Image: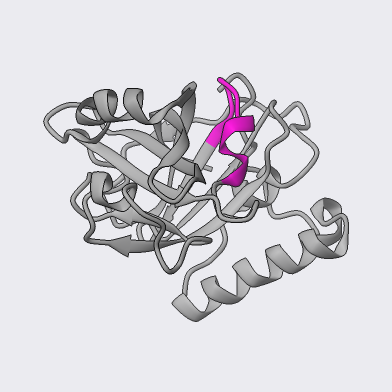
Amino acid sequence: MAGTLSPAAERPFDRFASGFGRVAAVLSVLGVLVALGLSVPSAWWDALGPGGDGAAAPTYTRMTPADPVRVAAGGPSGVRLVSPLVKSTVEPRAALAAPPDDAPLVSWWDGSARAGAAQGQTILIGHVAGGHGGLTQLGEMAEGDTVDLLTERGTMRYQVSTVRTFDPTTMDRVGLTLFKQDGGAGRLVMISAGGWDGAAYQRSVVVTAAPLGRPTD
C-alpha cells in the first residue's frame, strides 16, 4: 500500500463528507460503533478524506489478536470502503455456494485468524446483490491501498498486496490456499462474490493484504 492512511488527529466531519449518501453511510457507521461502545480510530476519518497531508509515515506495533467488528479501506485507488462485520460460522466454500439472506453484509469467518494474529489468515466475505454489498468496490482496489480492521483492542492495519478476479472453476481450485489456516502469516483475505446466475457466482474478486500492525499514533 504505497499510500498509507495518516493516523493524525480526528478531522471535522465536513472535511470528508461529500454528498448525502456518503454522510448517511458514515453516520450509520458511527451509530453502530457507539452502540458497541467503541471509538472510531482517527485513521478511519483520514481513510475517507482526500488523501495524505505530508505527515511522517506511521509506525506500527504488534496487536493482541481480537475479533474484527468493522472494516475500513482507502488509499491511492480512491476506494472508500466502510462496513460493519458480522461473525459467521459458515465455512467460506459454503458461504460462496449460494446467496445468503443478508447479502449486503460483510462477514468474518470465525474459523479464520483474528485480526493481529501472527499465523493463519483473516477471511472476510461479501456478496454483491443488485449492485449492492459491503465489498462491492473490492475490484476497484489497488496494490498500495490500506485496510483497517477495528477491534475492541484497537485497529489492525494491512497493506493490499494483490487484487484478482476469478471465475468459478479457478475459485474452486485456489480456494484451498485462500482459506487454509496453517500458513498465511496473519494476512487479510477479502472476497466479494457477484454475478449469481441461479446456480453459482460467476465472478469472485479476491484481495489479499499483508499485516502492518497496530498504528502507534
Q: Can the viewer see residue 41?
A: no
User: Is 163 included in the stretch rendered in magenta?
Assistant: no
Front-most of residues 140 and 26: 140
Furthest-bottom residue in this view: 35
Count of marks overlaid on the render: 0
Furthest-left residue in this view: 182
Give the residue displayed 61% in from the left and 67% down from the top.
29
**Residue 131: x %, y % from top left:** 65, 51
In the rendered view, would you say 12 is above or below 177?
below
Quadrant (top left, top right, bottom left, bottom right) of the N terminus = top right
In the rendered view, would you say 106 is above or below 204?
below
**Residue 113: x %, y % from top left:** 23, 44
Give the residue displayed 22% in from the left and 61% down from the top.
89
Give the residue displayed 55% in from the left and 31% down from the top.
58
Front-most of residues 60 and 29: 29
In the rendered view, would you say 161 is above or below 107?
above
Where does the magenta region start and end?
Answer: 136-146
In the picture, residue 169 is in which quadrant? top left
Furthest-front residue in this view: 198
How does the figure colour the protein chain or chains? one colour
